[in-house]
Image: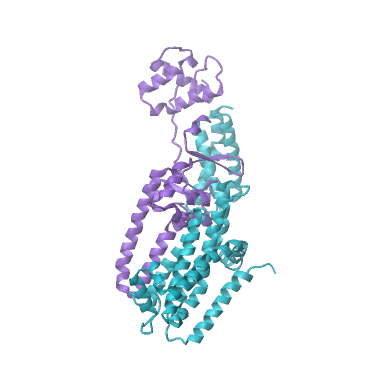
């Protein structure tokens, strides 16, 4: 068969396939005349066949290019995946996220150790030698912290220049979720980035806690952080764990190539990051609107905090198991 | 094929066993697309700052949340739209696809954009650039992890109009590679200057039995052979 015969014989099919594809991409027409899926699929398969033939017979490039283009356009339409939707989100919360966390239990344990180790160490060190705080943050920041949690302060928490819960809500979202993402992405450097961010944030929190405890502001400080800590600290550890998974895949890819191992690790651990975003959104809301409420009696605050910790840990431990 | 060694074409295989050619986009077009997107984001933030400035605490919250969303989810939102590209990428004629040629999935888009944090270290996208320059398919670290690829939007294949020349049988049967070369010359004829066309046709003049000669008349005979090879008969 000569190229000319080939073209004249199949041109009509290619035109039809192309017109179906343009119809699909311009949504307006779809309601009036739906695209016949069966016809589209069969035209696509025939175009694939003809492309293979045209290549094998070395037909002129304009024919091969045309076929290449319509098959790849049709391929995109036919094999596209839709992952959106509420059902998907519900499944993510009810099953996928807690399961992914449990599947990465070893990484979570390492991340928790790397985060809590410096936290406790620095906490004790600073408690017994308060001047050590100056090796972590400068004097001005220390004074600010002290001011924030002092009995005279109107509202507890971090710097409150804008002076409103809403403003702080926005600040926490931008700042905290950014830290979570950093802990995750740092995993690409053989896990070192994740380890660094985990240890650094742990050390900072520990130092501040140790210092404020030593200054006798412990009840102000702990009643502020303990509730949203259930979500925030867990989220930081989990995103670090997701980063460690990626780093581990790069160091020890096993029987896969490093690229394949990295792609697989990213696909599985990104599920944890979805959950981390959710946890940090909750943490931001709690921190801005609940933790800062000073008029709340302390026993109530501690009860709610205990409830939150039990809820978060119980959710990660039990939720989504096969019954 | 030997031409692949020089080209940056990525072959993706469909379940039907067909290899689809994707043209990976290089550093410069991606940098320009990024800068355009950066300007757009700054513009949006500037306008938002003007509006939220008069709203007090709630305004600050909206501003910070918008900043956060633009920072992390601006690319995700646009990559998942039906264009598969941010406005900057669309302007440059490139888009993001999975490396099997399919539209990008939400998980992949989120992965590649969160891992941007690693790409932009130590400064000015240093690691991302390094990764792109070391790889044939120009993936940055985030693309490697997410199995995504930035490709040129395929342009509509140019309509080939061949001159209507009387077909002429070649002096002897031609092997496939030579047939392809003669037909490709005819397809490019309209885009070449007359003297260059004559020069090239002169090289292939033996197919029409005009060994060693060249000129407009020989060119017409060579183009006639191309027509014959395409299947046209007098």
Using the rendered image of the protein, determine whether residue A16 is visible from the camera's viewpoint.
no
B34 left or right, relative to A30: left
The colour applied to the residues of chain B in this rendering is: purple
Vertical relation: A200 (above or below) A300 = above
Frontmost residue, A235 versus A81: A235
Frontmost residue, B159 versus A294: A294
| Residue B18: percent from left, percent from top | 58, 39
Vertical relation: B146 (above or below) B217 = below
Frontmost residue, B184 versus A115: A115
| Residue A146: percent from left, percent from top | 37, 77
| Residue A138: percent from left, percent from top | 35, 68
Residue at 43% across, 12% down: B212
Check the image and name the residue furthest to the right.
A323
Check the image and name the residue furthest to the front.
A129
**Image quarter for residue A130?**
bottom left
A75 left or right, relative to A142: right
Residue at 45% across, 86% down: A296
Frontmost residue, B1 versus A28: B1
Using the rendered image of the protein, determine whether residue B147 is visible from the camera's viewpoint.
yes
Vertical relation: B203 (above or below) B4 = above
Which chain does cyan denote in the image? A
Vertical relation: A212 (above or below) B224 = below
């Amino acid at each position: 068969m000569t190229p000319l015969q080939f073209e004249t014989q199949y041109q009509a099919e290619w035109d039809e396939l192309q017109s179906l594809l343009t119809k699909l991409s311009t949504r307006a027409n779809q309601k009036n005349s739906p695209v016949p899926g069966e016809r589209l699929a069969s035209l696509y398969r025939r175009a694939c066949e003809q492309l293979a033939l045209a290549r094998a017979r070395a037909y002129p490039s304009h024919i091969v290019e045309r076929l290449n283009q319509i098959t790849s356009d049709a391929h995109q339409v036919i094999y596209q995946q839709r992952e959106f939707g509420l059902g998907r989100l519900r499944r993510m919360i009810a099953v996928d996220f807690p399961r992914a966390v449990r599947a990465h239990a070893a990484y979570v344990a390492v991340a928790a150790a790397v985060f809590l180790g410096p936290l406790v160490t620095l906490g004790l060190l600073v408690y017994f030698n308060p001047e050590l705080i100056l090796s972590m943050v400068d004097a001005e920041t220390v004074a600010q912290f002290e001011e924030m949690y002092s009995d005279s302060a109107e509202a507890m928490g971090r710097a409150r220049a804008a002076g409103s819960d809403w403003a702080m809500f926005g600040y926490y979202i931008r700042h905290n979720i950014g830290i979570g993402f950093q802990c995750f992405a740092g995993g690409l450097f053989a896990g070192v980035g994740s380890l660094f961010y985990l240890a650094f944030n742990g050390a900072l929190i520990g130092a501040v806690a140790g210092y404020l405890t030593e200054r006798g502001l412990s009840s102000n400080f702990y009643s502020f952080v303990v509730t949203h800590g259930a979500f925030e600290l867990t989220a930081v550890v989990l995103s670090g764990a997701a980063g460690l998974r990626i780093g581990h895949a790069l160091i020890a890819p096993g029987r896969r190539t490093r690229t394949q191992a990295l792609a697989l690790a990213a696909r599985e651990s990104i599920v944890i990051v979805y959950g981390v975003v959710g946890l940090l959104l909750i943490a931001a809301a709690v921190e801005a609107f609940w933790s800062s409420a000073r008029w709340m009696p302390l026993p109530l605050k501690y009860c709610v905090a205990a409830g939150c910790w039990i809820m978060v840990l119980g959710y990660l431990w039990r939720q989504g198991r096969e019954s | 094929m030997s031409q692949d060694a020089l080209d940056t074409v990525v072959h993706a295989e469909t379940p039907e066993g067909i290899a689809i050619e994707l043209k990976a986009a290089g550093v410069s077009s991606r940098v320009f697309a990024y800068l355009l997107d950066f300007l757009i984001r700054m513009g949006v933030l500037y306008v938002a700052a003007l509006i939220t400035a008069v709203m007090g605490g709630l305004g600050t919250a909206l501003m910070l949340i918008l900043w956060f969303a633009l920072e992390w989810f601006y690319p995700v939102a646009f990559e998942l739209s039906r264009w598969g590209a941010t406005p900057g990428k669309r302007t440059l004629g490139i888009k993001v696809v999975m490396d099997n040629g399919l539209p990008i999935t939400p998980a992949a888009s989120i992965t590649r954009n969160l891992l941007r944090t690693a790409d932009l270290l130590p400064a000015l996208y240093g690691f991302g650039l390094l990764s792109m320059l070391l790889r044939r398919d120009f993936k940055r670290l985030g693309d490697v992890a997410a199995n995504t690829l930035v490709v040129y939007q395929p342009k509509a294949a140019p309509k080939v109009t061949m001159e209507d020349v009387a077909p002429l049988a070649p002096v002897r049967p031609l092997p496939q590679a030579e047939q392809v070369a003669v037909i490709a010359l005819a397809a490019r004829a309209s885009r070449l200057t007359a003297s260059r066309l004559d020069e090239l046709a002169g090289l292939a003049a033996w197919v029409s039995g005009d060994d060693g000669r060249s000129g407009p008349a020989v060119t017409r005979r060579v183009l006639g052979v191309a027509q014959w090879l395409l299947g046209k008969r007098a």
